Image: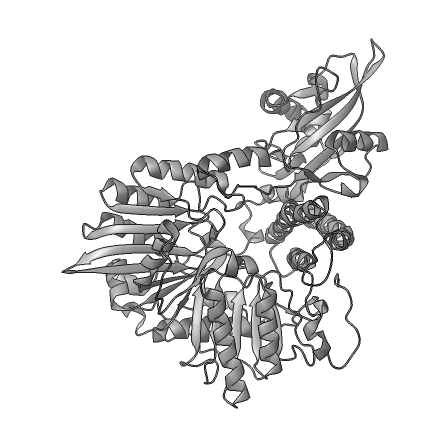
């Protein structure tokens, strides 16, 4: 489906250089990514439960889109803002386009779920209606309801003494219209289904058979009401709320301010009300009135509300319906040093490619530093991590051992604010110096710094990551961990903790200080090289391409004859392949077993691409205005020959070479899956089967090198 406005028919798009039409719409590009995820749920080449997982991810992404992007558009409309997006649309026009796109996407998601349910049933995984249950199963569900569900539920009758209850974000609820047969009176009752309850109740036995919890509740309501109360009708509904946090610039106590803001967010404006499509019109009007929303905010669903919940039925009981298990490798080079990460880094830089190589390397790096008597200080950024984070435990261990430990915790990491507050308190109790960075900037850079006394000198060991310090995410996100000796990492921490702006950065680029300018300089160099007849090329791998200034610079490069290859996971508002504007730009997206998350920026620098002379940078910054201007980000150059070759000639070439998991984008924002046979190249398979270049140790010296990858001529 093409959800963008059509382009004018012309052979030369050079005049678009000054027009907003040179950009695609950001909101529709987000939905285009959801479309690609949905099509992976429909992909028969994936194992069945993995297809269920893709559909769950698509639904979860869509929930976030409503909570964040649609909420933002509505806020602009409420505030009377007249600003237009870079593609020239008002907030109201964008919201109208979004509603049109959702009108197609949501039914397709429900149809996909129906298809998957049929396939699950063929594989003896069933989600049954009550009409398909035997008497024994109904009796078991009744007893289960009485013992394990009913004590948690609270029916709230709606009258002057019982006002309409607050419905939490993504909360599933029932509104029940009852009749008191003795008093001949009608009353509405709301029953919220706590999120602590599983959405699917599994029946006992070896078979995987489930019933929706809302159906279990409705069929057993007689246990909650007297005999004279009869149910006339009921409806299941679900609300999505605005999740934006408002934090004042002059906040004196940032943690206290965020705790209050989180409480307010729970009561954010209702953005959409989801309800089953056969809902009684009077019941729907009643809900709309109580929630204070208009008819355009109602999403009627012919299927399952809260489709993200289907992840609950994915289990390890059916390995035949899952991707084959994969155990991440541990870099042999570190084993050569008996597991001593610091000694391995001292000898040579190393890059670890997750999830193909274990995240345990990052944990071991910090644990070793915590226990090393010669380590004097550890500094760490934390954007997202788990509540039981081994990274946090290592920092606590180091602080308790008397080391100077500083943790920069980003309280503004959306949806992780509460976790980060809890982790901050734990670390402070152990003696870790916890700071929160800037109020008006998110600290998104992923850096660990270990300062160690070695003889008369202090040596700085640094880890730069493209992903979060999250051990669970490191199993499904493809990310890069770069270990090197780097004093400039300390300057970044001084900037964040003490507002000490670095004056002389020789290697790394830091946003919002000089990262944008650094990228512009590198692109300008490629333009100049192309104009002088020298080799020129730009390769980009990131999650989003949304910054208008950078896109215009890439258009300029294309017009100068610079080939630009972009591998983007999510949203891209650049229009590739337009004559006179972007004919030398190609954009593709990779979707498969793992979620692409690494950011790499490579520039030919006057030589063939790929080649040893190329400038290669990695870090945590996407090509978005927020990353370049409103976040603390770091891009670090890869100069060690082995690390350079691994990222450029192995990782980037594999991404560009991939066919089996790739989608190619056209100038309208539409993505087409590449035609591929079963034996065509797949990047994820290649990395699972071959060791990385920089992680090779003595044990692999005799083993053959991974197959050298070469791009086909376009």
Percent x, y of residue 381 = 39, 51
Q: How many marks?
A: 0
Residue 576 drawn above or below residue 198: below
- Seen at 48% across and 75% down, the residue is 522
Identify the image quadrant of the C terminus: bottom right
Left or right, residue 318 beside residue 182: left
Pick out the residue farthest to the top.
Answer: 182
Q: Which residue is pictured at 60% across the width and 78% down the height?
A: 556
Q: Which residue appears at 73% of the width and 12% of the height?
A: 226
Q: Please say whether residue 680 is visible from this viewpoint.
A: no
The answer to whether 507 appears left or right of 658 in the picture is left
| 155 and 356: which is toward the camera | 155
In percent of width and height, residue 621 lies at 49, 61
Q: Position of residue 630 (x, y in %)?
A: 51, 55
Residue in the foreground of this view, choosing between 588 and 166? 166
Residue 314 screen position, x and y as percent: 58, 45
């Amino acid at each position: 489906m093409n959800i963008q406005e059509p382009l004018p028919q012309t052979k030369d798009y050079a005049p678009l250089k000054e027009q907003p039409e040179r950009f695609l719409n950001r909101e529709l590009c987000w939905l285009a990514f959801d479309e690609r995820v949905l099509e992976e749920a429909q992909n028969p080449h994936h194992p069945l439960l993995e297809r269920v997982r893709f559909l769950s991810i698509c639904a979860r992404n869509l929930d976030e889109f409503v909570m964040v992007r649609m909420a933002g558009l509505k806020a602009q409309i409420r505030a009377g803002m007249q600003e237009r997006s870079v593609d020239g649309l008002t907030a109201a026009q964008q919201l109208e386009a979004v509603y049109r796109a959702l009108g197609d996407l949501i039914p397709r998601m429900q149809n996909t779920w129906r298809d998957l349910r049929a396939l699950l049933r063929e594989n003896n995984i069933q989600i049954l209606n009550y009409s398909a249950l035997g008497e024994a199963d109904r009796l078991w569900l009744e007893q289960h309801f009485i013992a394990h569900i009913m004590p948690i539920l609270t029916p709230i009758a709606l009258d002057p003494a019982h006002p309409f209850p607050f419905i939490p974000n993504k909360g599933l609820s029932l509104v029940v219209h009852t009749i008191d047969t003795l008093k001949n009176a009608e009353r509405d009752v709301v029953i919220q289904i706590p999120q602590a309850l599983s959405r699917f109740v599994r029946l006992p036995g070896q078979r995987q058979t489930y019933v929706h919890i809302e159906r279990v509740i409705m069929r057993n309501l007689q246990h909650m009401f007297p005999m004279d109360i009869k149910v006339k009708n009921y409806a299941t509904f679900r609300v999505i709320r605005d999740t934006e946090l408002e934090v004042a610039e002059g906040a004196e106590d940032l943690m206290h301010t965020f705790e209050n803001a989180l409480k307010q967010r729970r009561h954010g404006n209702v953005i959409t009300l989801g309800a089953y499509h056969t809902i009684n019109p009077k019941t729907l009007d009643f809900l709309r009135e109580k929630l204070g929303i208009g008819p355009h905010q109602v999403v009627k669903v012919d299927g399952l509300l809260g489709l993200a919940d289907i992840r609950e039925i994915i289990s390890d009981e059916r390995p035949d319906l899952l991707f084959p298990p994969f155990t991440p490798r541990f870099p042999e080079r570190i084993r050569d040093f008996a597991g001593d990460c610091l000694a391995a880094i001292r000898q040579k830089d190393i890059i670890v490619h997750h999830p193909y190589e274990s995240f345990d390397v990052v944990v071991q790096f910090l644990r070793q530093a915590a226990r090393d008597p010669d380590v004097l200080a550890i500094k760490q950024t934390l954007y997202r991590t788990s509540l039981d984070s081994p990274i946090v435990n290592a920092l606590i261990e180091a602080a308790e051992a008397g080391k100077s430990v500083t943790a920069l915790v980003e309280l503004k990491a959306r949806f992780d604010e509460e976790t980060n507050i809890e982790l901050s308190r734990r670390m402070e109790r152990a003696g870790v110096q916890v700071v929160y960075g800037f109020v008006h900037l998110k600290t998104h850079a992923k850096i660990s710094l270990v300062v160690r006394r070695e003889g008369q000198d202090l040596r700085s060991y640094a880890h730069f990551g493209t992903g979060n310090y999250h051990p669970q995410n490191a199993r499904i996100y493809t990310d890069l961990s770069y270990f090197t000796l780097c004093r400039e990492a300390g300057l970044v921490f001084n900037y964040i903790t003490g507002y000490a702006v670095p004056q002389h950065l020789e290697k790394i680029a830091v946003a919002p200080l000089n990262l944008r300018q650094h990228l512009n300089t590198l692109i300008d160099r490629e333009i100049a090289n192309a104009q002088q007849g020298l080799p020129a090329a730009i390769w980009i791998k990131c999650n989003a391409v949304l910054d208008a200034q950078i896109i215009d610079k890439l258009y300029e490069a294309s017009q100068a004859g610079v080939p630009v290859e972009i591998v983007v996971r999510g949203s891209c508002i650049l229009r590739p392949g337009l004559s006179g504007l972007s004919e030398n730009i190609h954009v593709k997206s990779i979707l498969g077993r793992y979620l692409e998350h690494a950011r790499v920026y490579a520039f030919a620098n006057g030589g063939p691409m790929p080649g040893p002379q190329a400038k290669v940078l990695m870090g945590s910054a996407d090509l978005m205005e927020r990353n370049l201007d409103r976040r603390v980000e770091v891009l670090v150059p890869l100069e060690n020959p082995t690390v350079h070759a691994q990222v450029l000639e192995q990782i980037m070439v594999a991404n560009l070479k991939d066919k089996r998991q790739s989608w190619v984008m056209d100038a309208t924002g539409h993505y087409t899956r590449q035609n591929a046979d079963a034996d065509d190249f797949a990047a994820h398979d290649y990395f699972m089967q071959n060791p990385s270049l920089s992680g090779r140790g003595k044990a692999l010296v005799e083993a053959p090198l991974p197959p050298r990858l070469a791009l086909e001529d376009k």
